[in-house]
Amino acid sequence: MKTEKNILIAFLLNLMFAVIEFIGGLFTNSVAIISDAIHDIGDSLSIGISYFLENKSKKKPDKKYTYGYARYSVLGATITTVILLFGSLLVIVNAIDRIINPVEVNYNGMIIFAVIGVIINFLAAYFTREGHSINQKSVNLHMLEDVLGWVVVLIGAIIMKFTDISIIDPIMSILVAIFILVNTLKNLKSILDLFLEKIPNGIDINEIKEHLLEIKDVYDIHHIHIWSIDGYNNYATMHVVADLKNKNIKQQIKEELKEHRISHVTIELEEKDEVCSEEHCDFKVEHSNHHHHHH
């Protein structure tokens, strides 16, 4: 529950602040602040979505979602990420326009806003720092970005106050946007990996096979599939050819896989002389199997 409450607090803080900030951006005429506001509104929206979906993702498996609802948390991260992608592109376009047609900026107002911005976003980042799901990580990432964004704005505003070089404002906003863009793309990649059932990070199928084959009475392992629901819970299925008189085999396999962060395992046990209908599933073979019985 703790995480959800934190996400909610962060959401309200952020939304309230983003609105004030937007007005502040118009008032000080600073594109860096306006772009930060757009980014913040995007953030708070995504935090709201996250909150809603994070709640849903905690639901236990049922008849319709036999794996549970953990992927909803990933969906939250996806929506967030897409909002940020568009947000940062928008910011870059605006800033370029600003560089071409410079305007007067109210530096003092900017400094005041930036100080408030650093404080509020630091608090929000502090509230959301715990949490394991990709979703929460992405929420926390936003918070930290916001803090950084404001620190940059603050420094820029102070420099501009003393030098009167107003082009610093749009340049800052572009830097913040590029930073967000890069992080967002990284996030997007890890989300796509999940949806494409790519093997989870840090898991090596060959290494796992070797370890399992060292277990007494295990002769062969094939048809290994490993995937992750939410980047946190890993699942595996496999066919194990073994001496079935040894009753500890399943237990030992499960213990070995726990060390590789795989908590849910389904094992199909086979005798040595049993013909596995899917023997040697080296992806190529599987498709040609059903031609044989014509002969």
Image (spheres, grey):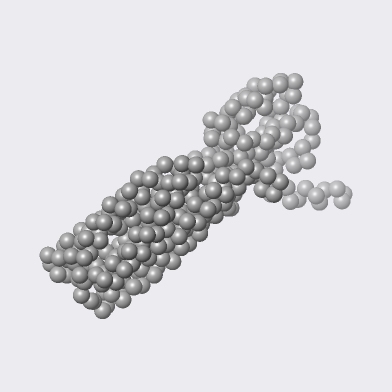
Residue drawn at (41%, 65%) of the image: 87
> In the figure, 177 relative to 67: above or below?
below
* Farthest residue, direction right: 295
Residue drawn at (76%, 28%) of the image: 272
Q: Position of residue 129 (x, y in %)?
A: 39, 44
Q: Position of residue 59 (x, y in %)?
A: 60, 45
Q: Position of residue 243 (x, y in %)?
A: 73, 24
Residue 193 appearing in the image: no
Q: In the shown orientation, is residue 68 left or right of residue 188?
A: right
- Of residue 282 and residue 260, the one placed in the foreground of this image is 260
- Of residue 224 and residue 291, the one placed in the foreground of this image is 224
Q: Position of residue 108 (x, y in %)?
A: 18, 65
Residue 134 appearing in the image: yes
- Of residue 85 and residue 210, the one placed in the foreground of this image is 85
Residue drawn at (57%, 40%) of the image: 234
* Farthest residue, direction bottom: 101
Number of numbered discs on residues: 0
> In the figure, 25 relative to 287: above or below?
below
Where, by quadrant of the figure, is residue 102 drawn?
bottom left
